[in-house]
Image (cartoon, rainbow, N blue to C red):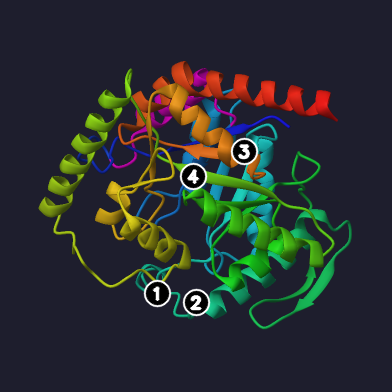
Amino acid sequence: MSIQFLGMIGHRLASEIIPASGPLFDKEYIARFARAHEEAGFDRILVGYWSDQPDGFLVTAHAAAHTSTLKFLLAHRPGFVAPTLAARKLASLDHLTDGRLAVHIISGGSDVEQRRDGDFLNKAERYARSDEFLTVLKQSLESSQPYDHQGAFYQAEQAFSAIKPLQKKLPVYFGGSSQEAIEVAARHADVFALWGEPLKGAEETVRNVRAAAAKQGREINFNISFRPILGKTEKEAWERAEHIRATAEKQLTESGFAFGKAKPQSVGAQRLLAAANEGDRLDKVLWTGVAKLVQGGYNSTALVGTPEQVSDALLEYYRLGIHSVLIRGFDPLNDAVEYGRELIPLTREKVAALSAADKRSA
């Protein structure tokens, strides 16, 4: 099986080491960023969701208008748009992108973040709502007849969407490391998304999610996220990592970041922080320097080394059954270009060789 590469685009230039600049909704940057991923050979790009940032539907539509083959993964939080309406919006966007859309359902790992948009459910309730949201969403996307729904969070009478996705089936990604997240993913997800854990933790998650999906009579694929830091030599790569850590710490300090704050509610974030507390360098090239700084608050673990070393590390995760990887850099646009030149083709070559060897041995 081939490996899929996902990237991530923002609506303006900014990162842990680059202060935000330009207009908040930078149309030119969005288009240029999307084209850079397409030219670099990425399969798909994630468009994120934040409670105070531009609308992802519109960012996706604009990026799609400036690309032709690149696919999109739109993050969406249930609770703010009815699933019947969300189905029509997603189906419409799938037509607009010529069938290049997938949706990443995010239940929300922070009460504070959710309440900014008026959502006061607790974490367990949010996952229960996501479960029901996906049930209704799929009915609207797939049903050829009107239907009724009476649930704990949503009610509808004679609901129907005249527009269906251009694709036969809109791919659904789902993330979260809690047991509630795994159970929802087992029922609904096509792809389960992990943050960049050490191999042992990733293997455990793959095993648990596969078992939960099997109980539902389903199979599921996996995606994992990393922040690769490349160098021409191993020494150069690690020097670059340390420079990124120092720069990120300075920028976070200047922004008033609360270092040493309580652990995030997200179980995935807690797992990242636990890994970071084990040490800076884990496995062969996994680096937790920035993950420790941000208290595991988001996908912030890095793979550090030469393209050869990082591609070898990705191959280890591929062997676990994780056949999709999201990579984004601390210098977002320039790193995407570098990945396309150095990392993506090399890793694809190694995966192809591994698959050929497996076929011969079979």
Query: CA gap, disc 1 to disc 3?
Result: 34 Å
Query: Which is in the foreground here, disc 2 or disc 4?
Result: 4
The reply to whether callout 2 and callout 4 are in contact (CB within 8 Å) is no
The reply to whether callout 3 and callout 4 are in contact (CB within 8 Å) is no
Query: Which is in the foreground here, disc 3 or disc 4?
Result: 3
Along the line of sight, which residue is nearer the eye, 212 or 165?
Answer: 212
x, y percent for residue 58: 49, 43
**Residue that carries the numbered disc 1 in the rendered image:** 111
Q: Is tag 3's residue or tag 4's residue first in the polypeptide sequence?
A: 4
| Mark 4 secondary-structure assignment | strand
Q: Please give the range of residues in magenta.
A: 24-43
User: Would you say residue 36 sits in the magenta stretch?
Assistant: yes
Q: Residue at x 53, y 61 (%)?
A: 77
Vertically, is 193 above or below 235? Answer: below
Q: Amino acid at mark 4?
A: Ser
Residue 123's tag is 2
Residue 318's tag is 3
In this rendering, does residue 51 appear at all?
A: no
Q: Quadrant of the N terminus?
A: top right
x, y percent for residue 248: 20, 44
The reply to whether callout 3 and callout 2 are in contact (CB within 8 Å) is no
Q: Amino acid at mark 1?
A: Asp
In this rendering, does residue 81 appear at all?
A: yes
User: Would you say residue 217 sits in the magenta stretch?
Assistant: no
Q: Residue at x 31, y 53 (%)?
A: 279
| Mark 1 secondary-structure assignment | helix
The reply to whether callout 2 and callout 1 are in contact (CB within 8 Å) is yes
Q: Residue at x 18, y 51 (%)?
A: 252
Question: Residue 144: which quarter of the image?
Answer: bottom right
Question: Residue 315: which quarter of the image?
Answer: top right
